[in-house]
Image: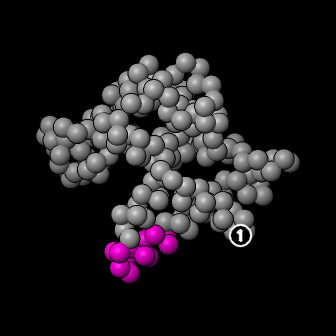
Amino acid sequence: MPWEAEKRAIALAARPGSVMLSSMERMRGGGLVAARTMVGAAFLSAAVLGASCDSGGKSDAGACENPTTPADNGCAILVCPVVPVGGDTAGDTYATFAQPFFTTYCVRCHSTTRTNPSFSCADTDPDCRHGAPLGHDWDDPASIRMYLDHIRYMVGNGNAMPPSGLQPTCDERFRLVRWIDAGAPGLP
């Protein structure tokens, strides 16, 4: 991978408020394992960004372009920002779109009321998070704000969430990514 792509990925991962930077700060002083994890995560970010926005992923102007091949779910892979910070969200705000999105698709696992992070707990267990990490609670605006980059990746780039059950449409995924890219307007 070209060095320029690696520099872009590391700069993106280390920007204030990014999930990568938060993880790195939590691991600081964690010894060799934490150092290996940070280096591995930085190179993974470089590989993901480089694969999407390098030579084949650049327009003549050099701007990042989203891949043209859809994800397995048929939705667009939204690697690059779809609007600038402060951009038009077509009226979508936290109250009018994002909060209902999280309630419909996410809080069945990502909720402050669910405390059992086991992957194997029963669906009938009201505390079951089905593997969702503790603290990744999409019914808590502070948690949403802390993990916006992660949410954006999992919903719009990786298209991996939710892993099962009721799924958002491709348009809903796009709208959530657009809301995040615009700066998450209305998020308390």
> Foreground: 62 or 74?
62
- Is residue 106 covered in magenta? no
Give SS at disc 1.
Answer: helix
Tell me: residue 49, above or below residue 66. below
User: Identity of the amino acid at label 1?
Assistant: Trp
Question: Is any part of residue 32 visible from this angle?
Answer: yes
Residue located 47% across and 58% down the image: 20
Q: Is residue 28 left or right of residue 177?
A: left
Q: Position of residue 27 (x, y in %)?
A: 37, 68
Q: Residue furthest right?
A: 60
The residue that label 1 is drawn on is 3
Q: Position of residue 87 (x, y in %)?
A: 63, 29
**Which image quarter: residue 143?**
top left
Task: Tell me what residue is drawn at x 42 percent, y 30 percent.
Answer: 187
In the depicted view, which residue is nearer to us: 162 or 178? Answer: 178
In the rendered view, tell whether residue 188 sits above or below residue 77: above
Residue 138 visible in this rendered orientation of the protein? no
Q: Residues within 10 Å of mark 1 (few under 14, many from 20)?
A: few
Residue 37 higher or lower than 78, as above or below: below
Q: Residue at x 17, y 48 (%)?
A: 116
Q: Please tell me which residue is depicted at 42% across the width and 57% down the height of the picture.
A: 22
- Most prominent secondary structure in the magenta stretch? helix
Q: Which residue ends up furthest to the left in the rendered image?
A: 125
| Residue 179 placement (x, y as % from top left) | 53, 31
For this rendering, which residue is in front, 89 or 41? 89
Side of 79 relative to 179 (left or right):
right
Q: Quadrant of the C terminus?
A: top left
The image quadrant of residue 10 is bottom right
Quarter of the image for residue 1 reads bottom right
What residue range appears in magenta?
29-40
Please provide percent x and percent y for residue 96.
44, 19
